[in-house]
Amino acid sequence: MRRKVACFLVTCLAFASVAGAAQLTSQEKAAVTAARKWLRLVDEGRYGESWRESAPFFRSRITQQRWRQASQSVRKPLGALVSRHLKTAVYKTSLPGAPDGQYVVMQFASSFRKKASAVETLTAVLGKRGAWRVVGYFIR
């Protein structure tokens, strides 16, 4: 009986530690929410609007016209979004090639009509007014 209780407690503790590790902080949750809204614009082909909704650092690195062209050439061949699931969201205060700040780097496991398996990586930055905005996007 003691052995069964001990096994049960070990199992519960292991499950609790895994479940706790999978939970997001409030900052990560807010960044993921903002990223999903931004991704919806991209999914709908509203590339100009996604550029306007991105962080100033993003907009300083690529023109709206270039962003529109690059997005169309990458996303259109994939077809419509089938599914997207958050894999990871990690809070960081420093990233290579970017000023120090508050960032969340996210990876989504995504599926499109013409590409069954893709990984979308987004980085969001917390702006001066407290809003999370996408500052980087990469899909493979």
Image (cartoon, grey):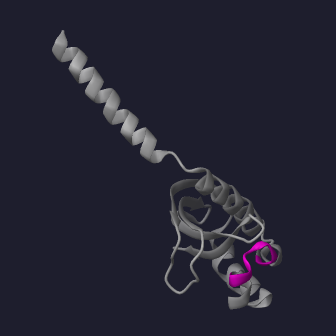
Q: Quadrant of the N terminus?
A: top left
Residue 101 at x, y percent in the picture:
60, 74
Whether residue 52 is in magenta: the answer is yes
* Residue nearest the observer in this picture, 71 or 131: 131
Residue visible at 53% across and 71% down? 93
Disc tally is 0
- Quadrant of the rendered image containing residue 54: bottom right
Magenta part of the protein: which range? Answer: 51-57
* Residue nearest the observer in this picture, 97 or 99: 99
Query: Seen in the image, is 52 located left or right of residue 126?
Result: right
- Quadrant of the rendered image containing residue 15: top left
Residue visible at 74% across and 60% down? 37
Residue 9 at x, y percent in the picture:
29, 23
Residue visible at 60% across and 69% down? 102
Compared with residue 81, is residue 55 higher up or lower down, i.e. above or below? below
Residue 44 at x, y percent in the picture:
78, 65
* Residue nearest the observer in this picture, 112 or 60: 60
Query: Seen in the image, is 88 located left or right of residue 80?
Result: left
Query: Seen in the image, is 29 located left or right of residue 72?
Result: left
Query: Seen in the image, is 139 located left or right of residue 62?
Result: left
Whether residue 54 is in magenta: the answer is yes
Q: Main secondary structure of the magenta part?
A: helix
